[in-house]
C-alpha cells in the first residue's frame, strides 16, 4: 500500500499520535491486489427481520477505508488488503461483482435471497464506490429479496438508500458503531463519531420505506479488561436495540489483524482477544433486547481470535452459531468446560492496566 496520508476530511479527528503511528505500521505492508478480483466471497445463512435467509457475502476490493488510510481504528487491518492508489474504477468493481456471481453459480443451488456487500470501509462513500457503481450494483441484485451495505454514518443519506429500495429490495445499512460508549469508541477504538451520529443515521435510514439499520459492535477493544468489555458490550447492545430503526445488532469479538495497534499490543503480550464464554454470556444476557442479536467470532479457537482453553472452543462456537439462527439461549446450557472457572477468575480479578491476566 502506498504511504497513507490524512486528507482534509480526516484532519482533527481521532488521536493524532495514534494516527501517525498507525500510518507507519500500515506502510509496512507491501502486498498488492488485483482490482478486478473481490477480496472475499462466501455463502452462508443469516438471521434477519424477515427470517433466516441463505446469503451471499461479498467483500469488494476498493481503495480502502478513508478513515483507515488516515490512521484509523486500533483493531482494523482490512485497509492492508485494499488496492494500491486509493481508488478502483467502475469497470473493475463490476468485474468483481461478476466474479462473485460466478462463485455463487458454482456453489449454490440458486440465487441467494440475501446479499451482503462490504468494502472493508464505507460502501456509501463515493470515493470508494462511485454513484455509478452503486446504482449498477443495486440493479444487478434487484431480483433478490434483501441487501445489506456497510457505511460510516457520515456517508448515509436517504437518497443513496433509495437507490436500492426503488428496486423493491429490503435494504439494511450496516454501521460499524463498535460501542455505544463515546469514551470507549474515541479512546480505545480511535473512531471519531458519537453515538448521537449513529442515532441520526438511523433516523435518516428509517425515513426510507423498507430500510433499516444493522449495528456492528466490537467486543473487547484494546485497553479494557474482560469484565469491562463484557459489561460495555451488553450495555451497547441494549442501547442500540432502543434506537428506532436499528433492528439487528451484530457483535464482533475483536480478533488480531496484521498492521494494527492491536497486533502490536498482542505481540508484546499486552492484549488477549475475548473469551468465547464472554460472547455466550453477552448473548444470554441480552435476549430481552428489542432487536435480533447475533455474533460470529472470526478466528475462533486461535490465539488471534476469541478463544477459551482450546478444548471447548468448537463446541461453544457451534452453540453461538445455533443461537444466531434460533435466538434460543438454552443452547448454552449444553456446553461446559473446566476453563469456565478460569474465565470467572479473570472477570473477577483482571484489571485494564495490567491485562491480560491469562493468555
Image (tube, rainbow, N blue to C red):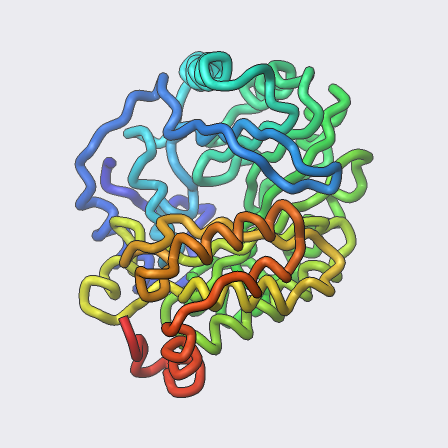
Q: Nearer the viewer, residue 164 or 19?
A: 164
* Residue at 58% across, 23% down: 134
- Using the rendered image of the protein, determine whether residue 331 is visible from the camera's viewpoint: yes
Q: Position of residue 335 (x, y in %)?
A: 49, 62
- Residue 153 visible at all: no
Picture residue at 59% right of the left edge, 68% below the top:
234
Question: In this orientation, which residue lies closer to the viewer: 8 or 223?
Answer: 223
Q: Where is residue 306 in the image (x, y as percent from the top left)?
A: 38, 59
> Considering only vertical position in the picture, is 272 above or below 38?
below
How far across and down, in percent of the image, does residue 303 sit? 27, 58
Q: Residue at x 52, y 18 (%)?
A: 108
**Which image quarter holds the N terminus?**
top left
x and y, in percent, of residue 189 in the image: 43, 62
The residue nearer to you, when weighing 307 against 39, is 307
In which image quadrant can residue 88 be found?
Answer: top left
Q: How many marks?
A: 0
Q: In which quarter of the image is the C terminus?
A: bottom left
Q: Residue furthest bottom?
A: 349
Residue at left offset 72%, top offset 62%: 289
- Figure check: 143 above or below 77: above
Residue 102 vs 84, above or below: the answer is above
Direction from residue 236 to residue 21 in the image, left or right: left
Q: In this view, does 84 lie to the left or right of 116?
A: left
**Residue 341 vs residue 43, the one in the foreground:** 341
Amino acid at each position: 500500500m502506498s504511504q497513507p496520508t490524512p486528507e482534509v476530511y480526516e484532519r482533527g479527528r481521532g488521536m493524532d499520535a495514534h494516527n501517525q503511528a498507525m500510518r507507519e505500521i500500515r506502510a509496512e505492508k507491501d502486498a498488492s491486489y488485483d482490482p478486478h478480483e473481490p477480496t472475499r466471497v462466501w455463502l452462508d445463512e443469516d438471521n434477519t427481520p424477515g427470517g433466516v435467509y441463505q446469503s451471499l457475502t461479498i467483500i469488494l476490493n476498493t481503495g480502502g477505508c478513508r478513515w483507515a488510510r488516515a490512521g484509523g481504528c486500533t483493531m482494523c487491518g482490512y485497509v492492508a488488503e485494499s488496492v494500491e492508489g486509493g481508488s478502483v474504477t467502475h469497470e473493475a468493481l463490476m468485474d468483481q461483482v461478476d466474479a462473485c456471481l460466478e462463485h455463487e453459480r458454482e456453489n449454490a443451488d440458486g440465487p441467494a435471497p440475501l446479499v451482503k456487500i462490504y468494502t472493508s470501509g464505507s460502501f456509501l462513500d463515493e470515493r470508494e464506490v462511485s454513484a455509478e457503481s452503486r446504482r449498477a450494483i443495486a440493479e444487478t441484485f434487484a431480483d433478490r429479496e434483501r441487501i445489506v451495505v456497510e457505511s460510516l454514518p457520515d456517508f448515509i443519506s436517504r437518497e443513496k438508500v433509495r437507490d436500492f429500495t426503488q428496486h423493491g429490495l429490503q435494504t439494511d445499512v450496516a454501521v460499524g458503531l463498535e460501542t455505544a460508549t463515546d469514551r470507549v469508541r474515541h479512546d480505545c477504538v480511535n473512531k471519531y463519531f458519537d453515538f448521537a451520529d449513529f442515532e441520526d443515521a438511523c433516523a435518516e435510514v428509517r425515513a426510507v420505506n423498507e430500510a433499516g439499520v444493522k449495528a456492528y459492535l466490537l467486543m473487547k477493544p484494546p485497553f479494557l479488561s474482560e469484565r469491562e468489555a463484557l459489561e460495555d458490550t451488553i450495555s451497547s447492545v441494549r442501547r442500540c436495540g432502543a434506537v428506532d430503526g436499528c433492528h439487528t445488532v451484530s457483535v464482533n469479538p475483536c480478533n488480531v489483524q496484521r498492521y494494527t495497534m492491536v497486533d502490536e499490543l498482542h505481540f508484546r503480550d499486552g492484549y488477549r482477544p475475548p473469551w468465547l464464554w464472554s460472547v455466550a454470556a453477552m448473548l444470554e444476557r441480552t435476549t430481552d433486547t428489542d432487536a435480533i442479536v447475533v455474533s460470529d467470532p472470526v478466528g475462533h479457537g486461535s490465539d488471534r481470535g476469541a478463544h477459551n482453553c482450546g478444548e471447548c472452543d468448537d463446541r461453544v462456537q457451534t452453540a453461538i452459531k445455533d443461537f444466531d439462527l434460533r435466538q434460543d439461549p438454552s443452547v448454552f446450557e449444553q456446553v461446559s468446560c473446566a476453563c469456565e472457572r478460569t474465565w470467572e477468575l479473570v472477570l473477577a480479578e483482571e484489571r485494564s492496566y495490567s491485562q491480560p491476566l491469562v493468555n
